[in-house]
Image (cartoon, rainbow, N blue to C red):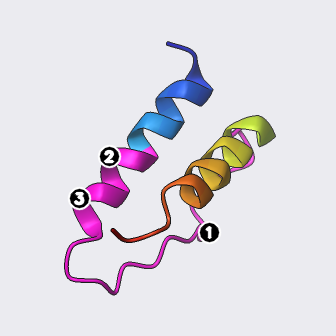
Amino acid sequence: MNSRKLIRKEVKYNMECLKPGGGFIASNIHNITAEVPPENIIAMFDAIKENRMYS
């Protein structure tokens, strides 16, 4: 599994765990370091957009 697919999978898993009850806010903060490739950050935000709706 390439890193973008793994990132998307992990974001989806974490969002599904944190959504119940509402109030979850997906956001980046200062802990994305300079060593993180930009494409991984984009993959994270794409996965957040894909999984942001509560069902």
> Badges 3 and 2: C-beta atoms under 8 Å apart?
yes
Task: Between residue 47 and residue 54, name the one nearer to us.
Answer: 54
Indicate which label's residue lies in the foreground, 2 or 1.
2
The answer for how far apart the CA atoms under marks 2 and 1 are is 22 Å
What is the number of the mark on residue 50? Answer: none
- Neighbours of disc 2 within 10 Å: few (<14), some (14-19), many (20+): few
Classified by dominant secondary structure, the portion drawn in magenta counts as loop
Three-letter amino acid code at disc 3?
Cys
Give coordinates of residue 36: x percent, y percent.
68, 40
Indicate which label's residue lies in the foreground, 3 or 1.
3
Residue at (20, 82) in percent of width and height = 21
**Residue 47 placement, left or right of 12:** right
What is the number of the mark on residue 13? Answer: 2
* Residue at image mark 1: 30
Q: Which residues are magenta?
A: 11-37
**Residue 9 placement, left or right of 49:** left
Residue 43 among those drawn in magenta: no
* Residue at image mark 3: 17
Residue at (61, 59) in percent of width and height = 49
Three-letter amino acid code at disc 2?
Tyr
